Image (cartoon, rainbow, N blue to C red):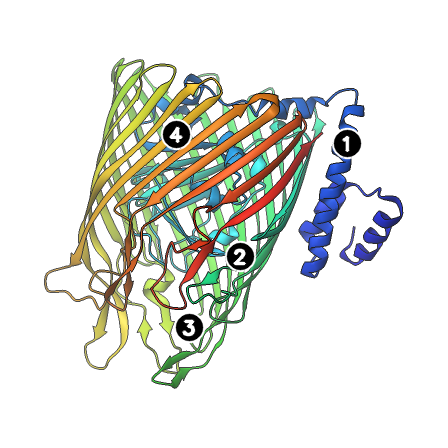
Amino acid sequence: MSCDKSDYIFESIARANAVNPLVLLMHVSYCPLHPSRRHRLVAIVLLLGGALTGALPLRAQVTAAAAAEARSLKKLDLDELMALEVTSVSKRPEKLFEAASAIEVITQQDIRRSGATNIPEALRLAPNLAVAQKGSHSWGISARGFNTDLANKLLVLMDGRAVYTPLYSGVFWERQDYLLADLDRIEVVSGPGGTLWGANAVNGVINIISKSAQDTQGLYAEAGAGNELNAFGGARYGTKLGANVHLRVYGKYADRDGGTLTNGTEAHDAWDMAQGGFRLDATTAAEDAFTLQGDIYDSDLEVLTGGDSRQSGHNLLGRWSRVFGSGSTMALQVYYDHTHLDGATPAFVANSIVLAPAGRLTDDLDTYDIDFQHTFRAGERHQLIWGLGYRFTHDEVGNSPALGFLPPVLEQKLYSGFLQDEITLRDDLTFTLGTKVEHNDYTGGEWEPGLRLRWNVNDRQMLWSAVSRAVRMPSRIDRDVSQGTPPYFVLLAGGKDFQSETVMAYELGYRVQLNSQFTTSLTAFYNQYDDIRSTSLNATTIFPLYFTNNVEGETHGLEMSLVYQAASWWRLQGGYNLLKEDLRVQAGGYDFNNALNETADPRNQLSLRSTMDLPHGWEFDVAWRWVDELTINNSGVAASVPSYAELDVRVAWHPDPALELSVTGRNLLHDHHVEYGIPGPGREQIDRSVYGKITWHF
């Protein structure tokens, strides 16, 4: 259906009320309609959903796909949860209980019960992460500190595709999304992962894993609206193409309102995003598995500084794996990813003098990546995994007068290889050692070794420890940025000698499942950082300032999570984080920001979630969180963000296994509150929001 058929759709509904809800939702997802028309479309989808609800009792039976999805609503018991297979710690499947790392798993059930509408909201469910919403379409997400505007020490993967940008080694979170109902789980590892995953896995790894097409058969659709989340909708259809070949296609759309500034005025950062994609999975009798998947998205965002930003992109990924009779496995993955940014930049003004006028910055990034790995046993005691990788990026920036990158066009190559050996010392004791070696165009060779020891005290207790090294290799901001481009005044420039940042991390963890009702995990860590980014004065002209590596320091803390099955129908989950940071300028060095440019982190975080399954198909879910005060950098001066507590509540009803009606309230304790930003009238507040949602599947 083309977008110019919108009027026909409305006319058809008025006359016959016979348009397929899936068609409408796909139309919402892909057509650049006026906001009022989008709202009308989603409202119509909701009305049709109500009509379908009335028709449900007339159906003789729920389809097999709906019944399967209904069964997935059942919570995993604690034994099943601890037996979940995860892959982020060892790059091979292992039970969650036996993973020798500080890992938290966000299951599909967790995501659905939270009422999350995008990936950043879902990541609040991981107690080992710090998640701060900066504005309507901006988040700061990190682990174990360094959650600044240019947070860059967390590697994020979506089905094996790395999504950090080489512009600043961080993540544009507003670009990263799936139809959340198609996610299988999100694995969140706090602590270095460089030994297997490479550069930028400094403080952790987030691995977002979607379901196979075989597990998402039939029709699924959702739609809703609220006061801040103006309108949203999504649909997926899965079908069987052959004996062992399955396909799904999906589309989703969301239109979100802007926030509120501390002076009470509108923040003007509303945004909308449309996304679609597919996944095909095939298996053979020879134990081969093949996956082909891709996504395309387009987003319009208002920005606080005035103007707008357009972000779009598409990606395609293929993965082949084989299991051999000996139990060894091989996997080959190839992907291509294109992202486009076209955004307004503010004028650079000092003392009422325009040093660089406003303009638009564009960025087009093409990434080509190939990765191979092989896992096999060598004798009875050695489990080896090794792999090779290559990544090529072509980055083309259209500079604005106020902000640019020099050179504007840059091509880079990244070569990598890794080897890890898991040695069974005895039945209850395992020692793992390995390293990753990489070569990048900025600093040349880098190495990231790691050692882990796991002791299974008994079948319900496990102790582990780890020592590892990780690096954050330079980004384009570190080397190539220019705040103000010639012939205009240049305030800040990249440092041509900027080197990789490094960390040596020491961890000790304990995981215990006391009984079928209670499990907990506790991790203590101590990290030593060297060559952290700093800002220096030009020796002869003072300006431009430039980036160097003059900051060092330590962080240490505790991470704790627990799950308590109070009753068969009631589960409680909690988490606590303690983080202490001591970053300082190296002896004989200088930093214009006084080592504050990398700190924007609360010392304490506390969270508690309750999920209740009530009679007659009702669900009641509550999530409370408390975040300690944090300080951020304001031109070398510490600025405070007050501590806050917030509450999210979700109520849902299943009148039929194929249908769910829910209402979710977020940030209910305050009309609005601040989670990030420098104090002043321009700091944005996060508003209370309430939205309703209807979900159905056939």
In space, the residues marked 3 and 4 are separated at their CA atoms by 45 Å
Mark number, residue 432: none
Sequence-wise first label, 4 or 2: 2
Residue 296 x %, y %: 61, 50
* Residue 576 placement, left or right of 45: left
Q: Secondary structure at mark 1?
A: helix
Q: Which residue is mark 3?
A: 403
Sequence-wise first label, 1 or 2: 1
Answer whether labels 3 and 1 touch (C-beta < 8 Å).
Answer: no
- How crowded pointer 2 is (Cα within 10 Å; few <14, some 14-19, many 20+) is rated as many
Q: Which residue is mark 2?
A: 339
Sequence-wise first label, 3 or 1: 1
Q: Nearer the viewer, mark 1 or mark 2?
A: 1
Quadrant in which residue 58 is drawn: top right
Residue 619 x %, y %: 55, 28
Sequence-wise first label, 2 or 3: 2
In space, the residues marked 4 and 2 are separated at their CA atoms by 37 Å
* Residue 600 placement, left or right of 165: left
Q: Nearer the viewer, mark 3 or mark 4?
A: 4
Name the residue: 52% across, 49% down.
689
Q: Secondary structure at mark 3?
A: strand
- In the rendered image, is residue 588 in sight? yes
Mark number, residue 573: 4
Q: Which residue is mark 1?
A: 54
- How crowded pointer 4 is (Cα within 10 Å; few <14, some 14-19, many 20+) is rated as many
Sequence-wise first label, 3 or 4: 3
